[in-house]
Amino acid sequence: MKNILYCLAIVLLLMSCWKEKREEVLAYAPVYGSDADIKTISLSGTQALESGGKIYVYNNMLYQVETGKGIHITDISNPALPIKTGFLKVAGAQELAIKDNLVFTNNMKDLVVVKIENNAATTIRRLPETFKYLFNNSRPPERGKFECPDPTKGTVIGWQKKVLVNPACSY
């Protein structure tokens, strides 16, 4: 009986010393948005360029995609002195075309047609799921470890790098 108590005490002592390895890594964490926020397209003041994408010139205006966030609008009527005039907030934006003063872009998986006039943006048409096979935000843009998406927090609208402790997902 005495031996059993000694063995039990040793096992408990060893278990109390056991610690889970804590690994801090620079990895991707999902950025979430609600469905209402995602589908809201609006025109706002200028923003700093962070992750520039495609560029489109129409008349005297230059439009540049801010990957995943929207479109910068710059007046280039005087090329020596370009003037940023606004930012079209469109969640998930990656593509851009303009015809007849209408902006065609993607809003996550949807194709949207937006008219900009009088300092306001109006969604003229939305074609749902047009980019359903091309747009996949379920994984980060680079291979490695990342924080697993949690559908209860909303829809993943992008990814940001930050220090994570023991990220559970990888690819």
Image (cartoon, grey):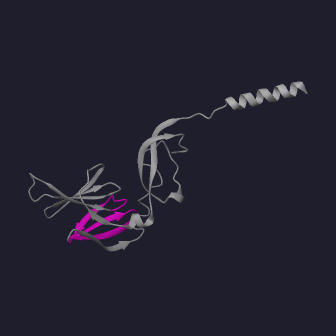
Q: Residue at x 36, y 60 (%)?
A: 91
Magenta region, residue range: 90-117
Where 43 falls versus 80 (above or below)? below
Q: Residue at x 29, y 67 (%)?
A: 104
Horizontal side, residue 111 vs residue 152: left or right: left
Front one among 65 and 47: 47
Q: Note whether residue 104 is visible.
A: yes
Residue 89 is covered by the magenta coloring: no
In this view, 41 is above or below 2: below
Residue 61, x across and y down, in percent: 16, 61
Q: Main secondary structure of the magenta part?
A: strand
The part of the image, by quadrant, that contains residue 132 is: bottom left
Quadrant of the snapshot with the N terminus = top right
Q: Residue at x 23, y 66 (%)?
A: 98
Location of residue 52 with respect to 131 vertically, above or below = above
Left/right placement of residue 93 relative to residue 115 reads: right
Horizontal side of residue 99 vs 31, given as left or right = left
- The residue lying furthest to the right in this view is 1
